Image: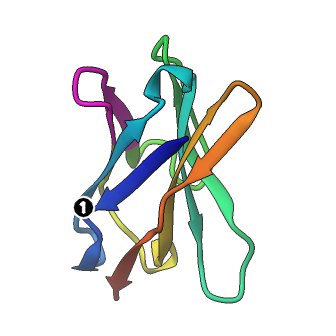
Amino acid sequence: QVQLVESGGGLVQAGGSLRLSCAASGSVSSINTMAWYRQAPGKQRESAARITTSGSTDYAGSVKGRFTISRDGAKNTVYLQMNSLKPEDTAVYYCKAEGWGRWYWGQGTQVTVSS
């Protein structure tokens, strides 16, 4: 089992920045990919960014160039640096861990971007 705890969400004006954190605990050695997903009101959950244990990253087109995903292996923590935020980035952001055919979700953290 893997437990994930997100933090760092909040309210920010358009053009501002936020950094989300996701701390993993439990069977962390089983994780090979960490990802951030987001779900806006009335919409499906979508992938925003992902990073593998080797450091390879991938971004959704809507966030590429504005968001940066990174990980600190020593702290078992993944970060999402979000810059140039837009009102359409408003969503609940979820951390996901994948490995050994299983996946785990965090509880989510709200990000609200005001215009």
Could you tell me how many numbered marks the image carries? Answer: 1
Q: Mostly what secondary structure, the magenta segment?
A: strand
Q: In terms of image quadrants, where is residue 110?
A: bottom left
The reply, left or right, for residue 26 in relation to residue 104 is: left
Q: Give percent across and percent down for residue 29.
A: 48, 20
Q: Is residue 93 above or below residue 52?
A: below
Image quadrant holding the N terminus, namely: top right
Q: Residue at x 22, y 68 (%)?
A: 16
How busy is the neighbourhood of tag 1: few (under 14 within 10 Å), some, or many (20 plus)?
some
Which residue is outermost to the top?
Answer: 54
Q: Give percent across and percent down for residue 3.
A: 45, 49
Q: What's under tag 1, amino acid-wise?
A: Leu
Q: Which residue is tagged 1? A: 18
Q: Give percent across and percent down for residue 95.
A: 49, 52
Q: Residue at x 48, y 30 (%)?
A: 27
The reply, left or right, for residue 62 in relation to residue 20 is: right
Q: Is residue 49 above or below residue 74?
A: below
Q: In terms of image quadrants, where is residue 8?
A: bottom left
The reply, left or right, for residue 45 in relation to residue 67 is: right
SS assignment at label 1: strand
Q: Residue at x 27, y 69 (%)?
A: 15
Inspect the magenta stretch and tell me whether residue 77 lies in it.
yes
User: What span is in magenta?
Assistant: 68-78
